[in-house]
């Protein structure tokens, strides 16, 4: 037993204490959280825009008279459907590599490229989440908006979207957790995220057990922490509905 503990201690010192290798994990964690947070913001912006376009098309396609507005809405909806099909139908790591090695091949800011890639990917899933929230709002709310003098656009913005967000807020929080884990592939384009930090330590010490276990433990703690926050949020939303 003493030999096992001594070996564990020596392995710990080799992987984390010597040459301050723990800093690779700290830097990687910072980059992971930074990429995740700003990717989610970009994803929410894209997702809300796409959800509004798609839900508006579904609600208005039979009511709008033929003309430029209806044609523009049809084009926008078709583009959004293509975007959703392509993004949801291809692996996120492939999208990341296309962004890094082709579209932004001249850029040296890998973190920013990752934010754009993960944000575009997240936007496709956020769009369907928000769209389901919009479609779940009772149709009478549109009539209420018209009775207040709002046209369709302002009814959507001031009445429908706030209610939809309340309905899908837990799902959006879960999307943040999913996105946090998806960013672990950022190392494919040489970004020093948390997983890459563990790989750097492993390559330097030729010891895989300790650094990879540490990476897995950090991800687990993060997911458990954010899952707890989501559960608290859901309970508060249920209380407010009573």
Image: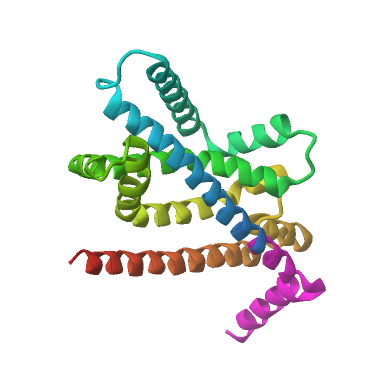
Residue found farthest to the front: 149
Residue 82: x %, y % from top left: 46, 24
Q: Quadrant of residue 59?
A: top left
| Colour mapping used in the image | rainbow
Q: How many marks?
A: 0
* Residue 221 in view: yes
Is 146 located above or below residue 242 in the figure? above
Residue 203: x %, y % from top left: 75, 57
Residue found farthest to the bottom: 2
In the displayed structure image, the side of residue 47 where residue 35 appears, left or right: right
Residue 46: x %, y % from top left: 50, 40
Q: Main secondary structure of the magenta part?
A: helix
Viewport quadrant of the N terminus:
bottom right
Residue found farthest to the top: 66
Is 72 located above or below residue 93 in the figure? above
Is 123 located above or below residue 66 in the figure? below
Judge whether residue 173 is colored magenta: no
In the displayed structure image, the side of residue 132 where residue 10 appears, left or right: right
User: 142 or 213, which is in the foreground?
Assistant: 142
Identify the residue at image location x=34%, y=31%. 56
In the displayed structure image, the side of residue 24 where residue 61 appears, left or right: left
Identify the residue at image location x=75%, y=76%. 17
User: 173 or 149, which is in the foreground?
Assistant: 149
Residue 240: x %, y % from top left: 24, 67
* Residue 182 in view: no
Identify the residue at image location x=32%, y=36%. 151
- Residue stretch in magenta: 1-29
In the displayed structure image, the side of residue 237 where residue 26 appears, left or right: right
Viewport quadrant of the C terminus:
bottom left
């Amino acid at each position: 037993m003493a030999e096992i503990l001594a070996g564990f201690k020596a392995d710990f010192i080799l992987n984390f204490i010597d040459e301050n290798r723990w800093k690779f994990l700290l830097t990687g964690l910072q980059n992971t959280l930074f990429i995740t947070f700003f990717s989610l913001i970009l994803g929410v912006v894209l997702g809300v825009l796409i959800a509004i376009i798609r839900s508006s098309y579904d609600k208005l396609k039979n009511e709008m008279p033929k003309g430029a507005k209806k044609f523009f809405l049809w084009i926008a909806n078709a583009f959004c459907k293509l975007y959703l099909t392509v993004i949801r139908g291809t692996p996120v790591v492939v999208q990341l590599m296309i962004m890094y090695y082709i579209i932004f091949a001249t850029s040296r800011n890998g973190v920013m490229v990752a934010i754009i890639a993960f944000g575009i990917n997240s936007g496709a899933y956020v769009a369907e989440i928000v769209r389901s929230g919009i479609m779940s709002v009772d149709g009478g709310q549109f009539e209420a908006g018209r009775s207040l003098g709002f046209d369709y656009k302002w009814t959507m913005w001031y009445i429908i979207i706030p209610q939809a967000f309340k309905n899908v807020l837990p799902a959006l929080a879960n999307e943040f957790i999913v996105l946090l884990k998806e960013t672990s592939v950022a190392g494919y384009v040489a970004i020093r995220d948390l997983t890459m930090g563990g790989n750097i330590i492993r390559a330097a010490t030729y010891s895989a057990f300790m650094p990879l276990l540490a990476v897995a433990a950090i991800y687990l703690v993060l997911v458990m922490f954010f899952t707890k926050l989501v559960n608290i949020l859901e309970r508060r939303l249920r209380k407010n509905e009573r």
